[in-house]
Amino acid sequence: MNRLDNTSKRDKDDDDNEKGNCTKQNKILELDLDYLERGGGGTLTVGGAPSVEPSPDSLDLVKVVLLGAPAVGKTSIIQQFVWSDFSEEYVPTDRKHTFYPSVIINEHLYEVKITDVPVIPYFPINSYYEWAHYRFYGLRNATAYILVFDLSNVETFQYIRTLRDQMVESRDMRNVPVLVVGNKQDLLCSNTPSAASGLQQLAIAESACGDSREKRRNIVNLVRKHWKCGYVECSAKYNWRVIAVFKELMEMIDALEWSGGGRSAEPPPDSSTGAGGGSHETRCVIA
């Protein structure tokens, strides 16, 4: 009799724990990007991103995939945005992770599915290759892409440049926003020695910084003028302009919603005076 009572008690405790976990998982973070960028919110209380995909009938579901070379800070950008958290320890992403924040842009609520995947050697050219090598990653049906590179190592830009070319060749990218993000802004020329360490070393360091700035200008010119994509620089470590990254992307998506005839209501409020600029100017459409 005592054994049965103890078993029933353990079963009840397990049920209570499962209910508690479900309650925690179903908490959804709502972020008003305009309010946050203005500095209106000092802290965010997050109970954890739900692991179950929300119903697509309730809100507009936006599927965002982050891609980039190893160690450029893709996961750190997501965690800083969703949880306001940064880890100094580098842990390579070895499997798909999914986050479900809700964001508000131009007074419209979006349910966002942010997917963080391991480094991929190439973008799948068709659905067969995606199923064979990147099953359940959702690479080819994403609503938008964020391509991340390391500002302190501009060679990592070549990786996303190759990926972007493969995407254009293998998928219809019209009305698919692409945002290029230069992360680790805090590391730019951070190793420049002081004048006390020697004028020659200082001159070498300043020359290296000048070369880096020239490469960055070329990247910005390529992305904005030739690719017609959005471009943002940030630092996930210090949470510099991380909100601006997702605000820029959501403005691009929101602009496409209006221009594509997806809504019959009045046009969105003019955001040309905001920090992100006019949404129609920043959208990314590859013809």
Image: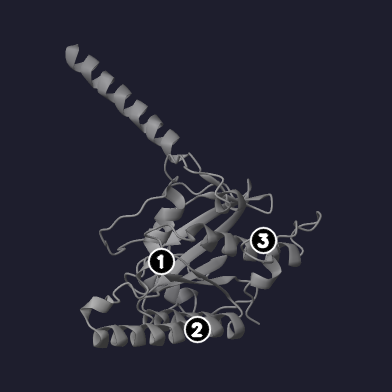
The answer to whether one can see residue 115 in this image is yes
Q: Nearer the viewer, mark 1 or mark 3?
A: 3
- Horizontal placement of 266 versus 100: left or right? right
Pointer 2 local density, CA inside 10 Å: few below 14, some 14–19, many at least 20: few
Q: Residue at x 32, y 72 (%)?
A: 190
State the CA–CA distance, disc 3 to disc 2: 28 Å
Residue position marked by numbered label 3 in the rendering? 254
Circle 1 Cα neighbour tier, 10 Å, few/some/many (<14 / 14–19 / ≥20): few
Res. 250 mark: none
Please state the horizontal and vertical placement of residue 213, each as a whole percent of the image: 44, 82
Q: For this view, does 259 lie left or right of residue 217?
A: right
Q: Nearer the viewer, mark 3 or mark 2?
A: 2
Question: Is the C terminus in the top left, top right, bottom left or bottom right quadrant?
Answer: bottom right
Q: Position of residue 184 (x, y in %)?
A: 38, 68
Spot occupied by residue 79 in the image (x, y as percentages of width and height): 40, 54
The vertical placement of 282 against 115, above or below, is below
Q: Which numbered disc, 3 or 2, marks the residue that appears first in the sequence?
A: 2
Residue occupying image coordinates x 30% and y 24%: 13
The kind of residue tagged 2 is: Arg
Q: Residues within 10 Å of mark 3 (few under 14, many from 20)?
A: many
Does residue 128 appear to the left or right of 111 in the view shown?
left
Q: Check the image and report above or below for 212 versus 268.
A: below
